[in-house]
Amino acid sequence: MPAPTAHHIPCAAVVYHPLKTDVAALKTAVAHREQTAGWGASRWYETAAEDAGVAATRQAIADGANVVLASGGDGTIRAVSEALRGTGIPLAVIPQGTGNLLARNLGAPLTKVDDVVRAAFTGSNRAIDLGIVRIVREDESETEHVFLVLAGMGLDARAISATKSTLKKRLGWLAYVDAGVRTIIKDRPLQIHYSIDRSPVKPLSVFTVMIGNCGLMPGGVLLIPEAKLDDGKLDVVALHPLGPFSWLRIWRKIGWENGVLRRSRAGRKIIDLVRDTRSVTYLRAERYALAVATPEPVQLDGDDFGYALTVSGEVDPGALIVRVLPEWRVGL
């Protein structure tokens, strides 16, 4: 049997955030795994600040990458996924950030670089959904993006917009909690109009509307118990407090009850939903649309995306292929 030509030898691409990646350690792990798997030398692409890695990934695709390893925080993973959408080229997540939201929801280890690199070369493919969002701003300009975990308008986006980068570096995810508490204290509810799956538009008074593709947050908090990465649905969460102490009920629900009881339907029936369902509303949808009278900040996977008057979009089922290992378990 003739030896394979160089043309037939698969090759990986590594798209990495230079300030968040231990390049030397990652190069060592990649070199070991590519050699063990019989792959060619991987190509390396540094992300650019202006697009977080979209252009670098498109170049990697043009250069014939068979898999793309994305190394960085949630913003890098989101940008690489945006470029890989619908291409069929698998993504391998190398978590290097504060939240590492997609890695958590895939069950990938957050500190074992060699394991996530091994997934790139020997793991299996899993198709997951992407959330699509179209943002219309005050000047009527419109942009379209993807999100992997969570998009939001209201309290969460305001908190992320208000989070100081120095605080985020020092405290990590807790910086958002600090900003969130300050936002809760000073802000009034947001008046929105919304439509789900092209239903008639309805008004709603909320502190936050979040569109989820999956539900696990840092600290093991299961924000959206029924959300799954591959169910062809998005999960809409509206938080609308009903008094000065209702935030305690909300955080008890999403922090303790959802985090401990996980996805157990029987467990959720134990919860005192009489009050909580008035403060937290869960809806499932394929399409969504939100509108506000004055511009509000928008966040995608924990990154500030500026101010918007309308946010709309849909789920793109199975649009992204990710590499996983069989031993990965979500929430462990």
Image (spheres, helix red, strand yellow):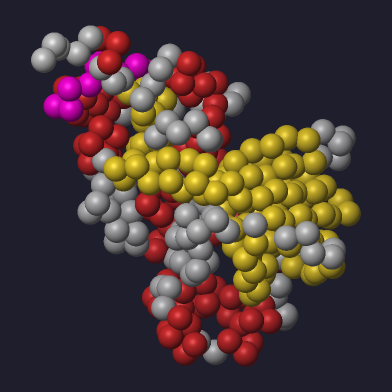
For residue 179, what is the image quadrant? bottom right
* Residue 186 screen position, x and y as percent: 73, 63
Q: Can residue 157 be seen here? A: no
In this view, the residue farthest toward the front is: 1
For residue 304, what is the image quadrant? top right
Residue numbers of the magenta segment: 36-44
Quarter that holds the C terminus: bottom left
Question: Horizontally, is 330 left or right of 327 in the view?
Answer: right
Q: Is residue 40 magenta?
A: yes
* Residue 209 screen position, x and y as percent: 68, 61
Front-most of residues 123 and 267: 123
Question: Horizontally, is 123 left or right of 287 in the view?
Answer: left
| Vertical comparison of 312 with 21: above or below | below
In this view, the residue farthest toward the left is: 1
Q: Residue at x 27, y 53 (%)?
A: 328
Front-most of residues 305 and 331: 331
Front-most of residues 140 and 81: 81
| Vertical comparison of 269 with 54: above or below | below
* Residue 241 screen position, x and y as percent: 70, 75
Q: Is residue 16 magenta?
A: no
* Residue 3 screen position, x and y as percent: 14, 12
Q: Residue at x 44, y 19 (%)?
A: 60
For residue 198, what is the image quadrant? bottom right
